[in-house]
Amino acid sequence: MSKLSAEDISSRMASYNQTVMTELLPKWNANFADNLPITKRAKNLDEAPFLCQKTETEDLMVLKRPHCIVIGAGPSLKKVDLSKLKNYRGDIIVCNKSYEPLLKAGVIPDWVCLLDADAISVTQFRFLEDGPVNDRTKFFVASIVYPETLRKIAMRSIDWGNLYCFNPTARTDEPTLVNEIWGWMNGKKAFAHGGNVGTAAVNLVMELGYGRIGLLGFDFIEEPRKEWTLKESMEREVWWYPDTNEYVHVPFNFMCYVQWLFMKAEDYQNERREVINLCESPLMRHTPVLKQEGLDEFIAKM
């Protein structure tokens, strides 16, 4: 896979951000307004229990709980035995629709991350209406998520101080004017999400300072569909991996997400920090940026 330059990524993300502002902002603003009574009561991320502390003798981070696994929602996750995570002693961060399957496997995550502003998220979190109360899981939720979904989450989190909200931005340098206005209204800080909920979750664990970050269910590819129109097909690139003779379809927006993830991983990794791919996606398996391990191997090293 050819790697885009930082300038290419910046240009593409700027174009993507413009699309977000013109097409999604009306919906985001409507959701934001409906969510204000809840988001005002939620916490900022800097009120969360951070995992790192500086020593008095050296300017290095000493990690209290060094390992974590971030669980995305890619199709490869269906092939994973999630019950194996019962033996994992690190922290688990899960993205939106993967939350319920994890609970069904008997695994309670430490964080749930949600960015989706559409009504589909209601079905993904409807189980919370009758689910058991759990005061361990913390929710990291965008202020523009679908209001009914946020109400279901708040019902199970806000009274325990486990609801954390952020105002989403794709900018990594400084907040936009919209973020400044949102922050003035709800008191929440801007947080760079990288384009989708998976990259937002990765940015979350980097902010919290984990030393070994395992990525599970991060595919960034699509299986071809017969119902695609010619225009939809042309919005995707087709990549071939000769060693496994696999063809994968990569939508343009996925390319932005994965390149953002790779740049963040390169900046984050050093002698004390690692970002490790645990899934079977050929795109993720063939990148030199991430270290490669199986889930069993990662769990055993904890």
Image: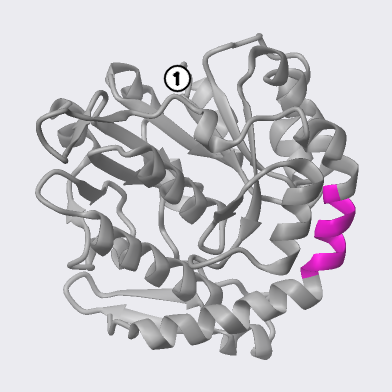
Quarter of image, res 255: bottom left
Magenta run includes residue 27: yes
Q: Is residue 295 visible?
A: yes
Q: Is residue 144 visible?
A: no
Q: What is the chief secondary structure element of the magenta stretch?
A: helix
User: Which quarter of the figure is the N terminus placed in?
Assistant: bottom left
Where does the image place residue 43, in percent across and percent down from the top left?
Answer: 64, 30
Q: Secondary structure at mark 1?
A: loop
Q: Which residues are magenta?
A: 24-32
Estimate the x, y position of residue 7 in percent, counting from the top left: 40, 87
Q: Is residue 200 above or below residue 231?
A: above
Please give the name of the residue rendered at 32% of the width and 33% of the height, measured from the top-left corner.
Answer: 68
Residue to which mark 1 is pinned = 107
Reply above or below: 150 against 88: below
Three-letter code, disc 1: Val
Residue at position x 23%, y 49% in the image: 276
- Locate residue 58, reporting x and y percent: 11, 36
Image quadrant of residue 162? Answer: top right
Q: Return the x and y of residue 185 as percentages of the image width and height.
A: 81, 47
